[in-house]
Amino acid sequence: MGSIMPVNDTETETVDKDFLSTFARGLEVIKSFDTESPSMTLTDLAKKNGLSRASARRFLLTLQKLGYVSNEDKHFRLTAKILDLGYSYLSSLNFTETITPIMERVAHQLGESCSATVLDGQDVVYIARIPRRGLIPINLQIGARLPAYATSPGRVLLSALPGDQLERTLVETNFQKLTPNTMTLEELRVEIEKVQQQGYAIVDQELELGMRAVAVPIYDRRHQVRFAMNVSSHVSSFTLDQIKEEFVPAMLQASSDMSEVLP
């Protein structure tokens, strides 16, 4: 949390008069509830966020009054209302009425799960998913995060970044050899150029052995990439040639259909 500016209004104004540090702190408090800390006491939350008990108490009571946090036996946890924030984003893309039916078509046509992701720093975040077959053991619920460098949607989204931003993101990424197939940084740079040219990305067992995935970019009417759509398959189901010959055309057609309805 060290990147958050001081809460002091005077000091904040000298740094950036348009930056509301208190609001930023509140968002960090919300984000601090995670798998490891689904519920926290006032003391726990203050310590995790580098806040005084008094400041932490104000944030928690405000969130509680707004309905985003509940308190039971002095343990605070997020409520389902927090999902409203995510659904507002999906609503802005008109997902339910226009995007989801196309994803369902792709999942049915290819017989595999179909997902939509956005780029957040060095990760991709899943914002929609149509499950099929249940062959892939990875937990990919809405909000799940995976490293962009080792995923097909991540490479699609990275390929859409301006050159300086792409390089900065790659340099800041903590590369790990997740499987024997995982690309190195230099190999990834070459692969991203290939993705830019061909308009899709295929990842073969780089995130997890046994899993292949292909992704395509989804553009809005200004031809800006809004998110990526990907389909995952077990290696026993389809060969790489089949993915190129069957999956890619179907997904590119779906991408075109989605781009026509995006604002």
Image: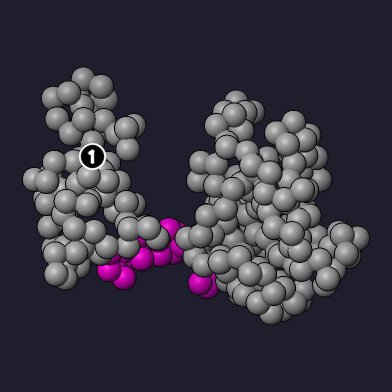
Residue at image location 26% in from the left, 49% down from the top: 29
Q: Is residue 188 above or below residue 80?
A: above
Taking the image as shown, residue 177 lies to the left or right of residue 173, namely right
Residue at image location 11% in from the left, 46% down from the top: 53
Taking the image as shown, residue 97 lies to the left or right of residue 81, namely right
Question: Residue 262, can we see it?
Answer: no
Q: Is mark 1 on a helix, strand or loop?
A: loop
Task: Identify the image quadrant of residue 256.
Answer: bottom right
Question: Residue 206, can we see it?
Answer: yes
Residue 123 % position (x, y): 55, 47
Task: Specify whether residue 87 is painted magenta.
Answer: yes
Number of numbered discs overlaid on the protein picture: 1
Taking the image as shown, residue 179 lies to the left or right of residue 17, namely right
Residue 151 % position (x, y): 67, 51
Q: Is residue 59 above or below residue 246?
A: above
Residue 131 % position (x, y): 62, 75
Taking the image as shown, residue 241 lies to the left or right of residue 118, namely right
| Residue that mark 1 sits on | 50
Residue 16 % position (x, y): 27, 25
Q: In this view, does 25 lie above or below 152?
A: above
Residue at image location 16% in from the left, 54% down from the top: 42
Instruction: Say which quadrant the N terminus sits in.
Output: top left
Question: Are there few (<14), some (14-19), or many (20+) residues within 10 Å of tag 1?
Answer: few
Task: Specify whether residue 82 is painted magenta.
Answer: yes
Q: Nearer the viewer, residue 158 or 206?
A: 206
Region rendered in magenta: 78-99
